[in-house]
Each structure stands twice: as structure tokens, then as C-alpha cells.
Amino acid sequence: MFVRGLKRKCFDGEEDIEGTLAGIKAIPSYNLQRQSLLDMSLVKLQLCHMLVEPNLCRSVLIANTVRQIQEEMTQDGTWQMINTQSTGQASLDRLVSTDILCRSSRDQAEGKHVPVYGTFSKDFQSDQAQDSSETMSTASSVQAPRNLQSNVWEMENPQENKGNFQKSLDQIFETLENKNPNSVEDLFSEVDNSYYDLDTMLTGMMSNTKMGHCDSLETFSSPTNTASNSNCKSDLNDLDHIVEILVES
Amino acid sequence: ADIISTVEFNYSGDLLATGDKGGRVVIFQREQETKSRPLSRGEYNVYSTFQSHEPEFDYLKSLEIEEKINKIRWLPQQNAAHFLLSTNDKTIKLWKISERDKRAEGYNLKDEDGRLREPFRVTELRVPTLKPMDLMVEASPRRIFANAHTYHINSISVNSDYATYLSADDLRINLWHLEVTNRSFNIVDIKPANMEELTEVITAAEFHPRHCNVLVYSSSKGTIRLCDMRSSALCDQHSKFFEEPEDPSSRSFFSEIISSISDVKFSHSGRYMMTRDYLSVKVWDLNMENRPVETYQVHEYLRSKLCSLYENDCIFDKFECCWNGSDSTIMTGSYNNFFRTFERNSRRDTTLEASRESSKPRAILKPRKVCTTGKRKKDEISVDSLDFNKKILHTAWHPMENIIAVAATNNLYLFQEKVN
């Protein structure tokens, strides 16, 4: 039992109608095949995050496949890009970011990847609504990306923040050194407690396993940040994020 | 027994090393011909077993580091001991395997069982003598090359200068000196400044067998880059770029994945190199960059099954390939415990199976055939009944004789050419 390999064919509306009318499709329509391939790829990318450390080569290949499908869907006009107000112009690159796929090797700070999967699944919904021939069969596949979306975001953070932990910490130390004397007292009054927490978190982390990511993150409430100084607020936000992640297990 | 993850003959072919998923290395030695046991010629028996790598935990990333041995490479023998490099995802180790068949007896300061003697009991001085003992093979780690790779190491290659070697991970290649463990030089770095732009990774790398300044590395996009270390310290600019133009008629969503090169090997002569992608093996002339000189289809019948192979992840399997000693034949593995050999001159190809049922000791292997058309002949196997869990990823060919080692999951098979 196997699905036939996909080959490029010119978009033929007749074929789709034939397919749906037949009931039991001997040859699934091209769009359907493409859609299921896209869904399968997304699921695979999700599973990547659950593994010990994602196989980078595999992740990159799957991501490239997804990009390819997206590009083709854009050209076909079956891909509607919903304008993201918060982030302004949405580009193809943002839709599937390898950045997300390469969790363990990220360099940059967290915070810009959240909208990605949100946009993606929303696009799927509008796309399916317009294409009547596919609504029935692809309803289930729409569910998949949407459910996975929240999971992805929760899982992305721990992995990525762990990688960023050292760097963020360095950044914080660096900015602390450069603070002007006036704000030093305020700064230290806030920071000291956090550092203390950091120590206990670190010792706690050592003895914990890595598999409690999602659950703990959901229940953990971020410490309230009452820093008045706007300069150190971003630093402390970073610190909060790190502390948040460290406590997860 | 654990799943075998690498197989490698040493330079003389007398020793065969295997690494497995549990971090163990097992070395086999070829039996010498003796008059009393004429039939034992060519038999390989276990010579040494040791635990090369242990599982580790990266506390910063909160990730496990697998102990699976990804590659073993032998060093050329320079004295009585044997040396090999073995690597897991992050750490390379140099192991010394030495024999001990003599033991010193008659120490002055300690008893035969090793306990220190009372000083007042030592009434005379004697010279310890060497007495023969049962052969003992010891493996000891001589160097540990660690902390140089952020990503997973996929290749190691000893240079022809016998002093340096390279280790390659998904994005970087490092150059080491065998004597120096606290420093390595980065010679290739394809990591983009913005990881979001990552679309290509390094899949394999190897030094040229004769020119110690030349190395090649393959990528997940089906390209091979040849670098000359004399040109600059960082070889990000390649000297040669090998890529076959894509055939537009066979393009599909899986084109890139199946073009990803899983192994690259120089021929012994150094004139050619061989690459393995998912469906084929290609031989390249180093002097011609725009296309390979020979292409061999390993299992073309899988092309119509790519979607389901993508679904069950088999499409990401990394098959290796190898040359025979004279570079006249190449070999690679497939599914259902099949492996294929291709004779370059006659273009004759053979499919053989590595399984208990078809491999009675000393029996000649029967060639197998996969049925690609509707009508299945007797003894043929249809594509749908292939077992995709039985994959032969690792094979090795003796450097001089026609003896091959084939790893089928957790079994090692050794076949040799029948001598009349």
C-alpha cells in the first residue's frame, strides 16, 4: 500500500473533479497529494523537536521540501498570505523558518518566531475554505497544524533558550557593566534576587531529566517584573525567560 | 548484539574493525594460513573488544550525546601496535591496540601477585625475567579530541601525511594534528550568519589519498566541493565544484532529498571519487566537474515509492559505498539485506543478499533479482515484499583481496571470492 510518488503536472481542474466524483480515488489529485505531503512534512518537523537532538540534515531537507511546496502553492495562487499586522510585511522566509528547525544551534535571541506557525495554519484555513473540492478531505489535515502550533511554540523555547542561556547571560553581564551609576542601585536591587534564583535553578536543573518541558512550562508563572528602570527591564525580561526555562523540569 | 554503525578494514586488510550503537568497537583478525587448518584461510576471528565511547550528557543544552560510533578510521601501522580513530557525534578518540605475550617475573619489591614485599624480606637482588604468557590484546585510549564540534560529526579522514586528520560535522570541518588534542583548526565553515538561511549541510568529507593538501566534502544538495588547503587557511572558497545538472523531466518534491549525498570516497588511485545518493552511485573524474563519468542505479524501482519512503523516513537512510583494491569494482548496500556490486569495465552488476538463510558457510551466494514488472519470475522478489527494515548501510572491501564485509543491522557477514 503506497501513495504514488509525486510528479509535477500542470494544474488541471478537470482532474480534480474527476477525482472527487470517482469517490474512491485511484489517483489522488495533485493538490491533494501536495497538501498531504506538506502536512506530513510539518508533522515530521514537529517530531524533530521531541527528539534528543534533531538530526540537522534531516531537518534541513524537510524544511527545504516544505519551502518548495509553499513556493509552488504561491505561484499557483492557492496560497493566500494573510497580512500580519504585528510584524508588517510577511515574507515566504518567515513562513517556515529553518531557525525553528535548528533549535539546538540557534544564536539569536528569542522572541520573533511566535507568529510563524500561527500565520501558517491560518493560511491553511482560508485556503481550504476557498478550494471546495478539497475541503472534505483536508479538514483533518488542517487540525494537525493548528494543534501542533501551540506545542511547537512551547517546545521551541526551552530548546532554543537553553542554547541561548549562556549568550543571554553574557549579554546581561555586559549591559550591567555599562550601566550608569544612577541606576545601579535600582538595578542591583532587582537583579540580586534573580541571580539567587538562578543559582538554585542551576543546581536543580542538573538533577532533572529533560522530558518535562511542556508540562512544567505551562504551569510555571513568570515572576513579576517591577523594575522601574526601562533600561534594565529588557535585561530582566531576558533573565526571566532564562529562569523560566531552567525551572521547567 | 548491538546495531553495527561502521565497518573498516585496516591498511593491510588483516584487521577489520566494527563500531556499534552501544559505543563498542570489535576488531577481527584474519587467521593465518597453517598447514594443520588449511580451510581456515581467510577466516576472521575476534581479536579485541573494547568500549570506545560512553553516553554523555550535555548539561548546557540538556541533551544526551549518543555513544554510537559513527566512523572508525585506521592509521597506517608504524610499529607493533595498531592505532585507530573512532568517533561518536562529538568526540574523537585515538586508540592503541597492542599485544602482550610476555610477562615479567621476579620483581624485587613486589610479590608475584603484586603486593609490596616487606623491606626486611628482600635479602637478595635479582633481575626480573620475561616469561611467555597467553596472548592478551589491550586497547588503550591515547588521545581524546573533544569539544571542537557543535554539530554532529559525520566523517573523519586521516591525511596522507599520517600526521593530521580532519573531522567534519554538519556545518564545519576541523583539522587536527594527531599529537595535539587541545587545538584544532577550522578549515571549512558553511554556517550562515543567520541560521534561518540554512539550506545546506555537509554530509561527508575525505582527504585525497595522495595529495595531503586536497580534501572533498559533499552536501545535502548533491554537490561536492574540492578544497586545496594551500590556497587559504579557511577553505570556504572551493577549488572545484562538482554538480550534475538536474534532469527536469524527473523533477519532484523529493528531488532534493534523493540527491543528498550520503557518502563520498576517493578511489585508491586518487584519480576518481565516488558519491552515493539515495538511488544511485556516481563515479566522478576529478578533472571534470560538470557531470559524473559513470552512474549506476542501485534500486531505481524505488523511485515510484518515494512518497511512502518519505513517510517512513527511509528516504533519509545514509548508505555508504566502497571501492575494491584495484578500483575496478564498487559496492554499496540496499534494502532487504541486499547489496550490490558494479564492475566498472564490463558494466556488470550483481545483487547479493546477506542473510542467514542464503549464506551457509562456504556456499556460493546466489545472485538475487528484484522484479520490477508485473510478472514475477521464480526466485524474483517483488518490490512490495522488500523489507525496508533490513538495510545494509555499511560495507567494506579488503584493500587487496576480494574479501568483503557487510553489516546487516546487528550481524556482520564476511564474503570472499571463491578460489578454485
Image (cartoon, coloured by chain):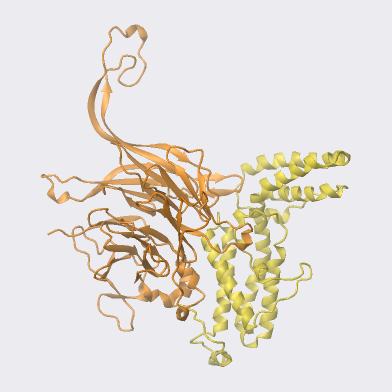
Q: What colour has chain B?
A: orange
Residue A46, quarter of the rendered image: bottom right
Judged from this view, the residue extending furthest toward the front is B231
Residue B98 percent coordinates (x, y): 31, 36
Q: Residue at x 39, y 52 (%)?
A: B2
Q: Quick check: B350 left or right of A77?
A: left
Relative to A236, residue A147 above or below: below
User: For the N terminus of chain A, which image quadrant?
Assistant: bottom left
Q: Quick check: B143 left or right of A161?
A: left
Q: Residue at x 33, y 82 (%)?
A: B373
Residue A108 percent coordinates (x, y): 68, 54
Q: Residue at x 43, y 76 (%)?
A: B305
Relative to B114, residue A194 above or below: below
Tell me if residue B21 can be seen.
Answer: no
Q: How many marks?
A: 0
Give the camera-side residue of B291 and B340.
B291
Q: What colour has chain A?
A: yellow
Tell me if residue A49 can be seen.
Answer: yes
Residue B29 percent coordinates (x, y): 26, 45
Give the camera-side residue of B104 and B409.
B104
Q: Residue at x 54, y 87 (%)?
A: A10
Residue B284, quarter of the rendered image: bottom left
Judged from this view, the residue extending furthest toward the left is B35
Q: Quick check: B162 left or right of B170?
A: left
Relative to B174, residue B95 above or below: above
